[in-house]
Amino acid sequence: MPYYKTIYTLLLFIVIICCCSCNGLDILARTGEVPTPIAELCLLKNANHGHGIVYNFSYDTKKLLTTVEGFSDFDKITYENSLPVKAENSKDKSYYITFQYDAKGGLSQINFLGKDSSGKPFEFKSNAYVNTKKEVEKINLSLPIFDDILETTIAYDKVGNVTKISVMKNGKATTLLENLSFDDKNAPYLGVPLSNVMLYFVIFSASVGNENTTYFVNKNNVTSAKVYSANGDITYSYQYEYNEEKFPTKTNVKRKYSGKEESYQESFSYNCPK
């Protein structure tokens, strides 16, 4: 199946991390602040998330993200009425992702379509349910690599940051990830935004890779987090350096797991309004 590419990438990511450990979007008003229009935000040009994960971004004349270099699932995004409706891999036409919306522009469905290695067509539909702020609070995630649907719930703070991701297992809610604290600065992907397009990957990363990729969705930057793994909890702490527009340019990340601590860096560059 095409989406095995993603799991292979994440598994490699996990192996790298384990080896290192063995060796050592809508902008919501904040209290006392005036929301910055998307047109005036810095647009992320390059993101290096460490461990060889590097993304490069290009935009159209409307400042909509159109190409993503470095992400294995897709590299091209198509829009209708400024909403992403299709994500595809220009080098592999065997699969693509579509996005559907309700009458108010809230995400209602993510569809994964294509052909498997034997040429047999497949279609996996994931229904999404949003609140009045158009934040996805529930999604029944169906992916080609999963046998079962992931019944997922997502909780947010008052400004739209993801605070918790949970799944239903055996009739009980099980927490996958918690973001415990945030700064009051702009998240690197705030001006993109990629929340609708990358939501499935955020959930996938937490459930399979035990990684925190909520930066694709958040308005502010996470300063501490915990990912719950069957083999033990993983804690994260983050320290940032910012540019004049209050976007992070460098992140120092500490990851603790099974009594081991790993440190690594992330870096970001932007096209900022003059």
Image: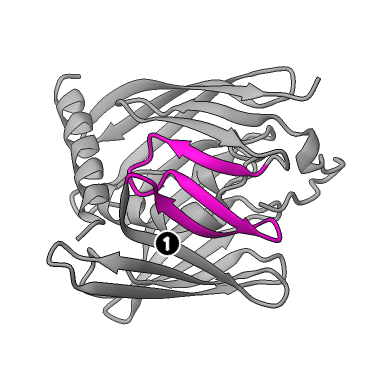
Left or right: residue 121 versus residue 174 is left
Colour scheme shown: one colour
Q: Residue at x 34, y 56 (%)?
A: 204
Identify the amino acid type marked 1: Ile
- Quarter-of-image position of residue 118: bottom left
At x 65%, y 69%, the residue is 106
Please name the residue that numbered disc 1 is placed on.
97
Residue ID at (24%, 56%): 2
- Report if residue 185 is visible in the image: yes
Q: Is residue 173 visible?
A: no
Q: Quadrant of the N terminus?
A: bottom left
Magenta residues span 64-91
Tell me residue 267's x, y (percent): 49, 21
Classify 137 as above or below 8: below
Quadrant in which the C terminus is drawn: top right
Figure check: 195 above or below 187 = below
| Spot occupied by residue 61 in the image (x, y as percentages of width and height) | 71, 38
Within-10-Å neighbours for mark 1: few <14, some 14–19, many 20+ = many
